[in-house]
Image (cartoon, helix red, strand yellow):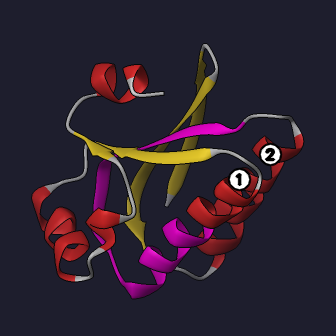
Amino acid sequence: MKINQEEHEDVVILRLGGKLMGGPDADTFQQTIRDLVERGQRNVLVDMGDVSWVNSTGLGILISGYTTLKNAGGVLKLVRVNKRIDQIFMVTKLHTIFDSFDDETHALASF
């Protein structure tokens, strides 16, 4: 998994690429979230447009990031989730936890 960061006003966009499957990816993602919280960044938009697959460990990575931000008074939202991954969110009921958007403009406006 690759993570690229960019800032848009008070929102940090994390652009993920590849497969979200755990292992070192979990540590990298969590450290990225912790670093953002330490810097005072509380609004995070995770762009999943280039994520090809998420397994159960990958879902755990997203949930952990969501929880870390929520406990710090922040928000984690998702954008550009592909249909296959969106179906996983539906089956696991995670669509009730994560705010998810089709396009970045609407996602950013939601903060």
**Residue located 53% across and 80% down the image:** 22
Local SS, label 2: helix
Are the residues at dot 2 and dot 1 in contact (C-beta closer than 8 Å)?
yes
Q: Quadrant of residue 64?
A: bottom right
The answer to whether any part of residue 21 appears in the image is no
Q: Which residues are magenta?
A: 42-64
**Residue located 52% across and 70% down the image:** 63
Residue 91 percent location from the top left of the image = 17, 81
Residue 33 numbered mark, or none: 1
User: 88 left or right of 65?
Assistant: left
Query: In this rendering, is residue 26 above or below 11?
Result: below
- Furthest residue toward right: 38
Residue 28 percent location from the top left of the image = 69, 63
Residue 51 in the magenta stretch? The answer is yes
In the picture of the structure, the residue carrying the numbered disc 2 is 37
Residue 89 percent location from the top left of the image = 25, 71
